[in-house]
């Protein structure tokens, strides 16, 4: 599989390593900070060309693009992938309010696109476990539900895309929670609000916790990433999955197919 990596920061470099270890050919590295004249100390893999933006030329020799970049660039990039006959894995967060628009952009493509806030297989095992626990507690008024997530200080979005995905799973399973409250609470929490709080600092790859709390006890369901390896392995596996498919898929479709349920 011939791969373009869009966004060559920490995630992009990790994707490069995993893709190469799985026998794929990284043909293009695309990032505004990369130029042929100044690589910033980065040593690209054999055969990789450096580009500063997503263009048809940059994608000309690629089967699939794996993107972890800026939400501001995603919609433009999706249009270029669609017109360039290149499959895409979009791991960038912060743009999901525009999914319907992205589906229209992709409607004429013969290839596939899969998007999601988190491609880690372990994270999706956690999401499904959390949803099941929430369904068990749905009618237990003594147990409140709340979410907290921690990420490194460099992360720009808050709450994380995974935390908001977790909130959606929880509210679908426990309908008494009708809205997400992501802000600091200066007063009492409303019973119908699902409070999603965030902390930023240190070097945490990402920790997400669902609490089911009562006066008697607390049940915690937690996913703690040790490194980016789970995220990037999932993204490369998703690229292998989407390569020969057509249409637009949320990451859950990939996970369901992978798990067989």
Image (cartoon, rainbow, N blue to C red):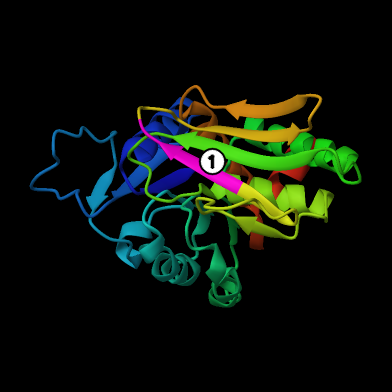
Q: Which is nearer the eye, 204 or 5?
A: 204
Query: Residue at the spot x=51%, y=47% of the render?
Result: 160
Per the picture, the main secondary structure of the magenta-coloured stretch is strand
Quarter of the image where one finds residue 234: top right
Query: Residue at the spot x=60%, y=72% of the render?
Result: 103
- Magenta span contains residue 77: no
Q: 59 above or below 138?
A: below
Quarter of the image where one finds residue 140: top right
Q: Which is nearer the eye, 188 or 199?
A: 188
Q: Residue at label 1?
A: 235
- Magenta span contains residue 199: yes
What percent of the width, then of the height, locates residue 149? 54, 37
What percent of the width, then of the height, locates residue 61? 38, 54
Quarter of the picture holding the C terminus: top right
What percent of the width, then of the height, locates residue 7? 34, 48
Say whether residue 229 is left or right of residue 35. Answer: right
Residue 253 seen by the camera: no
The range drawn in magenta is 196-201
């Amino acid at each position: 599989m011939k791969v373009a990596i869009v966004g060559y920061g920490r995630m992009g470099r990790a994707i490069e390593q995993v893709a190469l270890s799985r026998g794929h050919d990284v043909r293009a590295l695309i990032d505004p900070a990369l130029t042929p004249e100044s690589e910033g100390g980065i040593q690209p893999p054999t055969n990789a060309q450096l580009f500063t933006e997503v263009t048809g030329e940059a994608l000309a020799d690629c089967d699939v693009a794996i993107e972890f970049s800026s939400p501001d660039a995603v919609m433009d990039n999706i249009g270029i992938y669609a017109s360039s006959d290149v499959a895409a894995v979009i791991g960038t967060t912060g743009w999901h309010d525009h999914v319907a628009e992205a589906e229209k952009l992709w409607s004429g493509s013969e290839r596939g696109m899969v998007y999601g806030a988190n491609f880690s297989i372990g994270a999706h095992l956690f999401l499904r476990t959390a949803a099941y626990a929430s369904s068990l507690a749905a009618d237990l008024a003594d147990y409140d539900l709340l979410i907290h997530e921690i990420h490194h200080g460099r992360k720009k979005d808050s709450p994380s895309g995974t935390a908001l995905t977790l909130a959606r799973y929880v509210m679908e399973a426990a309908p008494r929670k009708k809205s997400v409250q992501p802000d600091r609470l200066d007063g009492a929490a409303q019973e119908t609000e699902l409070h999603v709080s965030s902390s930023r600092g240190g070097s945490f790859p990402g920790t997400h916790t669902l609490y089911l709390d009562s006066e008697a006890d607390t049940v915690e369901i937690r996913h703690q990433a040790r490194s980016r390896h789970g995220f990037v392995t999932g993204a490369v596996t998703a690229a292998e999955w989407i390569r020969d498919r057509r249409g637009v898929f949320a990451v859950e479709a990939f996970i369901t197919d992978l798990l067989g349920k």
